[in-house]
Amino acid sequence: MTSIFNHWFPTDASENAIKPEANYGGFVDLLITHQIFHPTSIETPWRVIYEGKKSDGDTFELISTQLHGYASNLGMGQICYLVGARGSECMFWKFKKGDSVEMKGIKVERGVVKISENGRFPAAKYDIEGNPGEIEIILTYIELNTAP
């Protein structure tokens, strides 16, 4: 998965950073941040939190609970995208700290990303080999909607 994220959020000569096993109230498999350089400091807003399991590992319900726990470290009003994987399947969420529904499911419908702002639908499950087009659409959306 790191190579996929490196494609969408390149770290060479850019402001992106991919941090494996970052410790934020537990060890996040991958945390992707966007570094903003100021004269006296560096700001690193979170872009993506990824948590992956083996195909016979935790359920998506447990993975989403774990991701929610990590994302809870964000400041009020901050947005981050969450990616959970189990074997070759993956799911995506948009997280906004403080919203009545903080973790919103993401799906692709007729080639367009849909976000369940009010929790009306769950995140769709995609297979990395069977649904590469939908996954590409979602990752493109995340890339375009997380840069400051």
Image: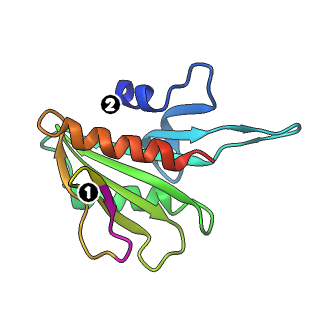
Secondary structure under the numbered disc 2 in the rendered image = loop
Residue 116 location (% of width, % of height):
33, 69
In this rendering, the count of numbered labels is 2
The reply, left or right, for residue 129 in relation to residue 74 is: left
Q: Does 136 sit above or below residue 117?
A: above
The residue drawn where x is 37% and y is 41% is 139
Q: Does 2 sit above or below residue 84?
A: above
Q: CA distance from mark 2 to mark 1?
A: 19 Å
Mark 1 is on which residue type? Lys
Instruction: Tell me which label, 2 or 1, sits earlier in the chain.
Output: 2
Q: Does 61 sit above or below residue 129?
A: below
Mark 2 is on which residue type? Met
The range drawn in magenta is 113-118
Crowding at dot 2, Cα within 10 Å, few <14 / some 14-19 / many 20+, comes out as few
Nearest the viewer among 25 and 68 is 68
Residue 46 location (% of width, % of height):
56, 48
The reply, left or right, for residue 15 in relation to residue 58 is: right
Secondary structure under the numbered disc 1 in the rendered image = strand
Q: Which residue is mark 1?
A: 107
- Residue positioned most to the right: 40
Q: Does 127 sit above or below residue 91?
A: above
Q: Which residue is mark 2?
A: 1
The residue drawn where x is 30% and y is 38% is 136
